[in-house]
Image (cartoon, rainbow, N blue to C red):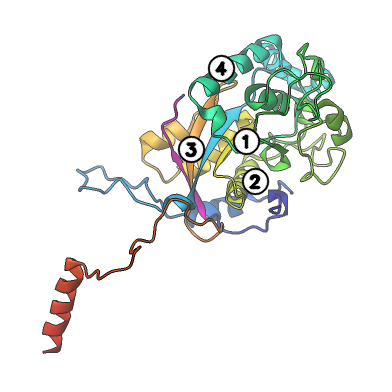
Amino acid sequence: MPTPPAAFATTAPATRLHLRASPSGSPAASSSSAVSRRRRYAPLRCSYSTSEMEAGAGTALYPLHRSKTIHLVRHAQGIHNVAGEKDYNAYMSEELLDAQLTPLGWSQVDCLRQHVAKCGLAKKIELVITSPLLRTMQTAVGVFGGGNYTDGIGASPLMVEGAGQSGRQAISSLNCPPFLAVEACREHMGVHPCDKRSSITKYHTLFPAIDFSLIENDEDVLWKPDVREANESVAARGMKFIDWLWTREEKEIAIVSHSGFLYHTLNMYGKECHPTVAEELGKHFNNCELRSMVLVDRSMLGSGTPTCNFPGKIPAGLDLPSDVVDEKRVEEARKN
């Protein structure tokens, strides 16, 4: 299993995110390190000019096996969203600890589930990564999980009945991709009780089929009551997380996360893009919004090999291209 992103050393990111038309460790890092990593990026498809572009100036080709498709989802409406909309100070309330979805939030989950099934996305996703907070896990299993769980079947449920005051039936882990909880895609950590997770021991009882093996501590040691994680730290953590995704073998991955995490991460990727693309990348996510992106490996982070390429010359035969003949003639002329 790839090393979780929390264990990454701080290195220059080697991946790029691109918008795609869809049918539809430690989080700490300094501001300067995040900016320096961004500056070491060379834009792949975002170059532009205010003057008239030459043919092909805004496009690029890249081998398919060096790309992945990721589907980013913000959690559905939580009780903290409602309380905070009415009074921002409510975010400091202990009553919102590890906030769960509202009834409206569950309706949003149902709508997105219908969408991913209708457009065929549900059958394409090979892995679902979720932030280990109650609202994101509820959203993840509700959208991408199996149908209603029936007692007596062999597989553990993704979610037990009524988990997190949901009033929902248990959700099956059959006929759906595996689910993996990852700390690195959490919301801003610290100060706000709604962004503090419960213990992994508790989560195991609520979400038996979610894989929590990449989370090192049972209790939430990353959340501090008096220190709110800086935006720059969230962005740096997000870029490490995106790089880590490339080390996964899956080619189509859904990530269920949070508004702040998605906003600050995608804005880092949009700083060198055409303003129109940057604006699209940098918008805040609505509750239960889905956006699809193409992740490109520009270095050798991954070890993927092409699955659809064909080497040709099978059966073998003479094969001298005409353009190679021209090159040979030019080379011989230079020699003479």
Q: CA distance from mark 4 to mark 2?
A: 32 Å
The three-letter code of the residue at mark 2 reads: Arg
- Label 3 element class: strand
Mark on residue 237? 2
- Label 2 element class: helix
Q: Nearer the viewer, mark 4 or mark 1?
A: 4
Q: Nearer the viewer, mark 3 or mark 4?
A: 4
In terms of sequence position, does the residue under pointer 3 or pointer 2 come before the other?
A: 2
In terms of sequence position, does the residue under pointer 2 or pointer 1 come before the other?
A: 2
Q: CA distance from mark 2 to mark 1?
A: 9 Å
Q: Nearer the viewer, residue 142 or 232?
A: 142
Residue 284, can we see it? no
Tell me the magenta residue range: 14-23
In terms of sequence position, does the residue under pointer 4 or pointer 1 come before the other?
A: 4
Q: Is residue 15 magenta?
A: yes
- Label 4 element class: helix
Q: Nearer the viewer, residue 245 or 329?
A: 329
Furthest residue toward bottom: 336
Q: Residue at the location (73% across, 41% down)?
A: 183
- Label 1 element class: helix
Residue 26's place in the image compared with 142, above or below, is below
State the residue position of label 3.
293
State the residue position of label 4.
114
Which class describes the residues within 10 Å of circle 2: few (<14), some (14-19), or many (20+)? many
Q: Residue at the location (63% across, 31% down)?
A: 256
Where is residue 228 drawn, in percent x and y? 73, 36
> Which image quarter is the C terminus in?
bottom left
Which class describes the residues within 10 Å of circle 1: few (<14), some (14-19), or many (20+)? many
- Answer whether labels 2 and 1 touch (C-beta < 8 Å): yes
In terms of sequence position, does the residue under pointer 3 or pointer 1 come before the other?
A: 1
Residue 161's place in the image compared with 61, above or below, is above
Q: CA distance from mark 3 to mark 1?
A: 16 Å
